[in-house]
Amino acid sequence: MNIHEYQAKKVLAQYGINVPKGGIAYTPAEAKRVAQKISARGPWMLKAQIQAGARANGYFSGKKGGKGGIRQITQIANIPNEASQMLNKTLITSQTGPHGRLVSKVYVEEFADVKHLFYAGMIIDSSAPAITLLISDDIIENIIQFADMGKGKFLRIPLHYDKGISDEKIYEILNFLSLDKSYLQSFHDFFGKVLFTFINLDATMIEINPVGITPEKKLLAIDAKINFDDNALFRHPDIVKMHDDYEEDERTLRAKRYGFQYNEFNGNIGCIINGEGLALAAMDTIKSHGGGLACSLNIKGGVDKEKIANGIKLIMTNPRIEGVFINILGGFMRCNMIAEGIISASQDVGLSVPMVVRFEGTNKEEAIAILQQSNLPVIFAENTDEAAEKLIAQMEVND
Amino acid sequence: MSVLANKNTRILVQGITGTQASFHVRRALAGGTQIVAGTSPKRGGEEYFGLPVFNNLREAKKQIEFDSCVQFVPAMGVKAAMREAVEAEVELVVSIAQGVPVHDMLEIKSMLKGSKTMMIGPNTPGIITPEEASLGIFPENIVSKGCIGIISRASTLSYEAVLETQEFGQSTVIGLGDDMIIGSDYREIMQRFMADEATKALVIIGKADNSYEQAAAEYYASLENKKPVVAFVAGIALPYGHTMGYAHDIITHGRVTVTDKKNIMRESGMIVVDNINDIHKALADLHL
């Protein structure tokens, strides 16, 4: 689960990490009031709240090349106007995709007087496995950039789960950033608190991009992003309350409500499977036959007939769908329940595109018989490869 | 012969009184798996399927001999169940639960270090040695005794691998688990298959995320006498960095695509197929 910058800063502040003073605003007038409350004099920072990075270099819909979603404003009188250029507008950044995200709130912050800025990210390295701190002096727009950065360009520090951060490791950071020993205490304090937050809240990523160093040698989180482990949310009811439904598309949300996982891609085939591995294999096999997925629904663990039918409808009503690929390996999941779900969904929303079904395992024969009796134009296949081949051939016929 | 589990393996089921556990314990017992006892908090002293039930492993250990555990405990209980198993020095633990918090796995991995316990899973269908032992939820009716060892990091694709190897049968099928952090990786299991007389060839099913396949290839390349390995890696069509689990590893260790993974595996001497339904043919070409 992700949260907004303003929420992440609130969380960090609760753990004793320094953040600039700020407040959230939903209207231009409110933005001005918040600014006046924070500080009598400018400049102020105005930051569009969407759960995607690279906001400063983004642009608002219809204004390509225009100002981005993070702005520095010196005159209080300009705040309402600048805020109105963001609120209820769509912000497009390198991380939002071409459709961008609607900005429903802005965060108004005091301008932080800092002299040195650097990148800090904390993630989990599964191969060690260990919580790992990443430090860089370069500008990082997306954490994925580290994948292509050469050794020596950034610092990677594995942290012991139960031992915290030693002085040696802090010296390593200071050395990398060309800072002297006088920063030891504030770095130790800052990263100790970040690690404590990370562990205590079951985070999978905390990104502070950038960290600023004040003239008093204090560290300040200028920006903040936190991802939490969905599997551990049962331990954190306060974090769950921060979830912003508007950040997820409707189909993903509805699939979640049924207990299923929905994903979107760029192709035109809708795919229903029960298991992540099957989803990957379906995607690969379809690609090898020249096709691509529009969306996939993973109904792993589904046992409720109505939920299954509703899930299938999510796929069948996606406007980009030109074919449906269903691959079920019945174990716990009984194939006949999927067959019944297909029939029920088809009765509600119709079946106007080719559909290929491959069943294997529990109640396979019964499932095939049910679908045959329904007279739906379903095509059957014996394995994944055959299913992909038949579907793409039929989609070409329909063209 | 087999790997990790056979007819002599004495198994205790943690969380034996749950619905899932009941279903699979009944099936495993019918198939001849030697399940000797179970645990369930506050249910100690009861009997289940004619088996003694204990409150915890410590109490069980005083009264009964067992060397392996299967856990049918909910995800949030896996950490505590693993702590019990490590303290009771159980040799092998198979953890079925889906959705174990990743921080719990970090703690579990540090518990396992230097312990006598080997963990398989979580989020795995488990281990099955046809006609001998089933530790988990693998359906007995699709496996048959034979010469192919299967190791998979994608639960549902391990069933596909079984279907692809029907002509040869399986020595043992092992699901490592689908999660980002798993109890045991390929290397430890490959080593055992290499030493197993019944196994003539191995099938490995890998995935796009994490770096477990690279480590397996490195290990395989270092072997002198090796059995053939047919490998498939799922996720070549997955948009790059689609899941965070994937991103974490490339962030920390550099960019490795599925194509890179396959190349690394090929260079190590493995036979890498591009389509999961090509596994059968690749095995047939080996003339085992």
Image (cartoon, coloured by chain):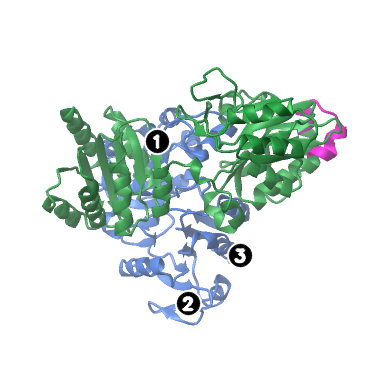
Chain colours: A green, B blue
Report the disc number at residue B53.
2
Q: Measured from the top left, where is residue B56 in percent x and y?
A: 55, 72
- Which one is in front, B145 or A134? A134
Q: Earlier in the sequence, mark 1 or mark 3?
A: 3
In this rendering, is residue A395 above or below A372? Answer: above
Q: Which residues are magenta?
A: A173-187
Residue at x-position 64% and y-position 44%: A7
In this rendering, is residue A70 above or below B117? Answer: above
Where disc 3 sits, the SS reads helix
Whether labels 1 and 3 belong to a single chain: the reply is yes
Between label 2 and label 3, give the one nearer the viewer: 2
Q: Are marks 1 and 3 in contact (CB under 8 Å)?
A: no
Cα–Cα gap, marks 1 and 2? 43 Å
| Residue B87 magenta | no
All told, the count of numbered labels is: 3
Q: Amino acid at mark 3?
A: Glu
Density class for disc 1 (Cα within 10 Å; few <14, some 14-19, many ≥20) is many
Residue underneath mark 3: B87
| Residue A175 magenta | yes
